[in-house]
Amino acid sequence: MFRKFLVLCAALLCALPAAAQTDKAGCADHALFPTRMPGYIIQDCKVEEYGMFDFSMAPREKLPVEGEYTFITYRIADKSQEPSALAVVRNYESAIQKAGGTILTSDPKRRVNGKIVKDGREVWVQAEKGNGLIWLRIVAKVAMTQYIVADAAALGNDLASAGHTALYGIYFDTDKSEVKPESQPALAEIAKLLAQEPGLNLKVVGHTDMTGTLEANLALSRARAEAVVQALVAGHGVAASRLEGHGVGPLAPVAANDTEEGRARNRRVELVKE
C-alpha cells in the first residue's frame, strides 16, 4: 500500500510544471514577461536596485543603460525539446510588441533587443539564446537614489561661488509636500552650515518637473520649500527669520523633461544666498 502511495506521489510531481519543481529558490519570471518558453526552468537570477547593462546594438556597438536591473537565466529541462534560436527570438519580439514596445535590433540566430515606454518610463529588454539557455536582461530606467549627501562645507562653497546650490537629498512622496524622514542627513548639513555662518540667510526654493499643470506644480513647489523651512526651524533650531520659502515649479529646469532622468534632476530643492 505504501509503495503504491509513493508511486502516486511521484506521478503527481511529474505532472507539476517544471518551474514548480526546479526554479532556483527566490527567482521568478519578470512581471513584463510572466510566461516563458515551454520546458525551461530558472537556473539563476539577479536583481539590482541600480545597475547597468551594455545592450548589443549594431555589430560591435554597445549601448549602456542604467536603472533597475533584472537578469534571469533560463535552462531547458530536456535538451531534446530545445526550441530553435529563431523561435525564441520571434517569441520575445512578439511579447515586446504586445507590451507596447518597439524592436530595436533583432538577430534571428541569437538575440532581440526592444524598448517599452509606459507612463514616461523606459524599459529596455534583451533576450538572448544560448546552448540550452535563454538569458533575459531587463533594465527599467530610473533615477539613481542619492545616498551621498553634500556636506556643509560643499554647500557653503557652492553658495559662495555660484550663489545657489541644488539639494537632491531631500525627499517627498509624489504630489506631497511632507518632508520624508530619510531627508534628515541633508537637513542636518544645512543646519550645520547656518550654525557655522551666523550671518547667512537663505531662500529655500522648491522645483518640480513638468508633469501636471503649471498651477499645481507652482503650489506644490512652494509647499515643499515651506515644509523644508519648517523642518529646519522645528527640528534643527534654525531661526525662522533666516529662511524664506519659495516655489518656481517647473520654470527653472536643469534638464529636459522628456526622460525620467531629466525629470528626477528637475525635482529638487535649491538654497539661494540672500
Image (cartoon, grey):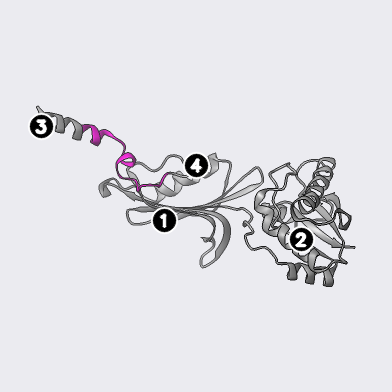
Residue drawn 69% across the image and 51% down it: 171
Question: Which-is-in-front pick, marks 2 and 1?
Answer: 2
Q: What's under tag 2, amino acid-wise?
A: Ala
Alpha carbon distance from label 4 to label 3: 41 Å
Alpha carbon distance from label 1 to label 4: 26 Å
Residue at the disc numbered 4: 31
- Residue 262 place in picture, x, y as percent: 71, 55
Question: Which-is-in-front pick, marks 3 and 2?
Answer: 2
Q: Count neighbours of disc 3 (C-alpha within 10 A) and say few if under 14, some if 14 to 19, many if 20 or more.
A: few
Q: Is residue 202 shown left or right of residue 83?
A: right
Say whether disc 1 or disc 4 marks the residue closer to the N-terminus. Answer: 4
Residue at the disc numbered 1: 109
Say whether disc 4 or disc 3 marks the residue closer to the N-terminus. Answer: 3
Residue at the disc numbered 3: 3
- Classify the position of the N terminus by image quarter: top left
Q: What's under tag 3, amino acid-wise?
A: Arg
SS label for mark 3: helix
Magenta-colored stretch includes residue 110: no
Q: What's under tag 4, amino acid-wise?
A: Ala
Q: Is residue 99 shown left or right of residue 250?
A: left
Alpha carbon distance from label 1 to label 3: 48 Å
Residue at the disc numbered 2: 191
